[in-house]
Structure formats: structure tokens, C-alpha cells
Image: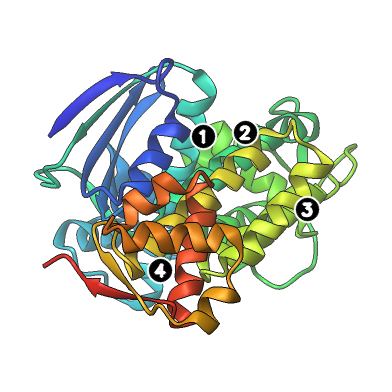
Amino acid sequence: MAFHGDCSSYPVPELLQWLDASRKTGALHLTWDAGERKLFLLAGQVVATAAQGLYERIARVLDVGQEFSGVEVVASLKSGAPKSAAMSAAVRQLAEEDLLGAITDVTATHSGRFHWTEDPDRGEDEWVSLELPLRHAVFESLKRLDEAPDVERLLPDDTRLLRSRPSPAPSHALHRVITKLVGRDETLPLGRLWLSMGLPRTLVGRAVFDLVKAGKLSVEGAQVPQNDPVADMLEQGAILLRERQFDAAALVFMTLLKSDPQDRRVRDFARMVEREHVASLYREIPPVARLQVDDQPSMMQALRPEERHLVSQAKAGLDVSAIVLASGQKEVDALKLLHKLVRQGVLSVSERPS
């Protein structure tokens, strides 16, 4: 199946969240005024990214930062065999950063086009393998959009002078290259930095912003940006989500929702947690499975009214999806109750899909 559309009518974050929730496999092609990117997905996970000139951009950054020879980087990318684990890690970090910057840019423009196909063929594209959950891409791109005004306040023009500060070398390749370039001179204008790297200003500016927050760079005449407590809590929630601690992640987001119900980031990620939790629960008890009831009086008497209702629907022979629909509860709440009843032995899965 293939479909295409306009990013103004189907915003990129919503599209990515749908692909993630649906565990889609295929290729998504995004195009907008400033460029184009491809995301290759396997069961909702980004396994590769591609773009015109991707190899050259990665090689130039690693070469100018004296990490690796640009010629060797291009040769290894074309052959698909990096010369070392260090080169492979640096290439992946830069490819992921390139993709996240592109998703942020196309989301910010509120324009562009997308094309989705279930054919994951990479053809002649310049692609780099990744292991990036789509939900992380959505989280990071929305975070960058929300913090864009802070970046602009820190770096309002390309004449801002950057200074390095004594600190251990960053672990991320892009941050490492930037600190090296700034450290070679007493001061380095932002404009010279991003031109020498050959990357979009927004991507370099964001990396500089992160380095200033981490205390590895300073900007003359600018105050150090303060950490956003909401972003910090969302990051912790995202970690819990990756670790599949759904109830703990939901608690984080519900706390944030109560304190600031208008924050788009919080609403989006609260929905993401719920979708991820529902998908996980259905993997344990499939929606077309049927349940058998252990009709012991002692067990039945201990049940609450909503639990008895679920049991009665199971007795009627409905499958799990129909029981959830007839429960009148939120999907995730009904599924959690069904799992609780299975753990207690009140229900058991009598028929699974073949």
C-alpha cells in the first residue's frame, strides 16, 4: 500500500506517531523547500535514513574535525563496511542528527509533502543504518521546536563569538567536532563555524545551544540558557517509556498535564504513552483471542462491578477487542483490567489466533 499527502493537512509528528503505533514497515519520503529525507522503517523503528549528499555531509564534518579522513569515510559508506567501530559510531551519530534536524525543519515549515510506501527498497540512495525509535524522533523534534526561541535568543545572528571552556571531550561526534573547531582559535564566529562544517545553521545552532547548556562552550555577551523543567521531566518519561515502564511514564505525563494542560509536548507524549501501552498489552493477549472464565463463587464475590462486567462479556463468547469495546472504559484501562483478571486466574486465554 502506498499513499501521499501534504504535511500541512497531515502534520509530520502525527504521521510519525501513526507509523509508530501501527508498527509499519516501509519507506517514508519527506520533501520540502529546504531539502528531502527518507526514513526506512521496520516494525515502526527507523533502521536507515537516506538523502542526497548525505555521505558528503558526514564525511566533511568528520574530516574538518580531524576525526577521520573524509575520503575514507565516503569509501566506507559506499562499501557498507566502516573501517572501525569508532567510525561507525560517529557516522551513525551524525546521520541521526541530520535526520532529527530535518524532521524538525519540515515540521516547523508547516509545508512540504510526504510519500509512504510499504516497499523498503533502498535502491541507489545514499543511506546509513540507524536504530532509532520513531517515538524518540517525535519527542526530540517537538522538543527542539519548543526550544527554538531559546536558541534564537542565545544566537540571534552569525556574528556571535563562541569560546571553548575546559571540560572533557563530548561523546557525540557533532559536539566533539564543534568543540575542536572552536578550541583552535580564541574565539570563533557562529557563521564561520557552520559554513566550515557545511551543515544547516539550525542544526549547528542547536548543537551549540546544547554545548552551552552543558558548560562546554560560551557565547560572548549571552547568558547561559536555563534548563526547561518540563523538557527534563519529559526526557525522564521518555526513558521510562523505552524501558517499557508504562505506568511510571504515564504518571510523569499526567502530573505534567495537571500542571500545564496547554503544553502541546505533554499532550502529545501522554497520548504516545497510552498508545504504546495498548500495543504492548495486545501483544500479550491478542485482540482476536477468546477468554475462558473460572467461575468460582469465591473469586466472583471479590470482583468489582466493572470487573464482573468484563467477565460476563467473556462468558458471552466475545473476543478481547469486543470485550474492550463493550466495557465503556478507555481502551488501556479495560485491557489492564483484563490482564489483572488473567493474572488472578479468573480469566484465561482459551483461544489464540493461529
Q: Give the residue pinned by disc 1.
A: 104
Name the residue at 50% across, 33% down.
Answer: 200
For marks 2 and 3, the one nearer the N-term is: 2
Judge left or right: residue 221 versus residue 12. right
Front position in the image: 338 or 180? 338
For marks 1 and 4, the one nearer the N-term is: 4
Q: Secondary structure at mark 3?
A: helix
Which mark lies nearer to you, 4 or 2?
2
Q: Are marks 2 and 1 in contact (CB under 8 Å)?
A: yes
Which mark lies nearer to you, 2 or 3?
2
Checking the image for residue 44, the label placed there is none
Splitting the image into 4 quarters, where does residue 119 fall? top left
For marks 3 and 1, the one nearer the N-term is: 1
Which mark lies nearer to you, 3 or 1?
1
Q: Identify the amino acid type marked 1.
A: Thr
Q: Give the residue pinned by disc 3.
A: 213
Front position in the image: 110 or 328? 328
Splitting the image into 4 quarters, where does residue 108 fall? top right
Gap between marks 2 and 3, in whole Å? Answer: 17 Å
Q: Identify the amino acid type marked 4.
A: Ala
Name the residue at 50% across, 19% down.
Answer: 109
Name the residue at 62% across, 47% down.
Answer: 207
Checking the image for residue 145, the label placed there is 2
Task: Tell me the crowding category of disc 3: few under 14, some 14 to 19, or many 20 or more residues within 10 angstroms, Cα based.
Answer: some
